[in-house]
Amino acid sequence: MNSLDQIIDDSNEAREIKRALAVKMQQNGIAPAQIATLLNVSEQFVSKWKKRFEQFGAAALRLAYTGSRSFLSAEQRQAVLCWIGEQETLSIEELAGYLETQYQVQYQSKQSLYELLEAAGMSWHKTEKRNPKHNAEQVVERREEIKKNWWRSKPKSKAAK
């Protein structure tokens, strides 16, 4: 079982450490108002975690959220990454279709598809052959301006001085 000291020493989660410190400080006789000020938390935070510690022990101070289960197993994910790597070009829609037909997985958000493409070393950004903001008139004007002023930007040689 986890002790307060183990949580404080071993945890990488600031929330767990604050909980354990709040309980330990209160056990050492420090007033809840002072603990709240020192840890930058509310007094309710201090009393809540003290009660949880008394009822359920130090393990109750740990974070309970472990995340959701992945739709793809580790082997399936690796197979998908290999498949993506074999493709010369790939759209989000093609990837979604592949996942649905091969693994019966349908993501609600495109974020998971973006992450798969990124993990495989591909970009999900749409490419365009030409710059959509291209203005031919502005380009010609800028070229003329550069031609007129090119001599001003040349570094002067020491002999010319």
Image (tube, rainbow, N blue to C red):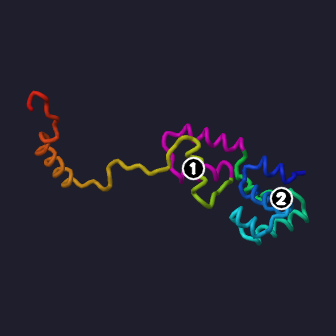
Q: On the image, numbered disc 1 is attached to which residue?
A: 95
Q: Residue 137's mark?
A: none
Mark 2 or 1: in front is 2
Amino acid identity at mark 1: Leu
Quadrant containing the C terminus is top left
Q: Secondary structure at mark 2?
A: helix
Amino acid identity at mark 2: Lys
> Counting residues from the N terminus, which is met first, the one under dot 2 or under dot 1?
2
Query: What residue appears at the point 57 percent right and 57 percent down from the top-left corner?
Result: 110
**154 is higher (above) or lower (below) than 22:** above
| Residue 38 image offset from top left, x and y in percent | 71, 62
| Distance between the alpha carbons at the discs numbered 2 and 1 | 51 Å
| Residue 40 image offset from top left, x and y in percent | 68, 64
| Residue 154 image offset from top left, x and y in percent | 16, 37
- Dot 2: within a 10 Å radius of its alpha carbon, few (fewer than 14), some, or many (20 or more) residues? some
Query: What residue appears at the point 24 percent right and 55 percent down from the top-left corner?
Result: 135
Magenta region includes residue 23 = no
Q: Residue 24's mark?
A: 2
In this picture, which residue range is highlighted in magenta?
A: 74-103
Please name whichever residue, 20 or 37, is drawn nearer the observer in this view of the structure: 37
Magenta region, main secondary structure: helix
Query: What residue appears at the point 13 percent right and 42 percent down from the top-left corner?
Result: 152
Q: Is residue 59 left or right of residue 143?
A: right
The residue furthest left is 160
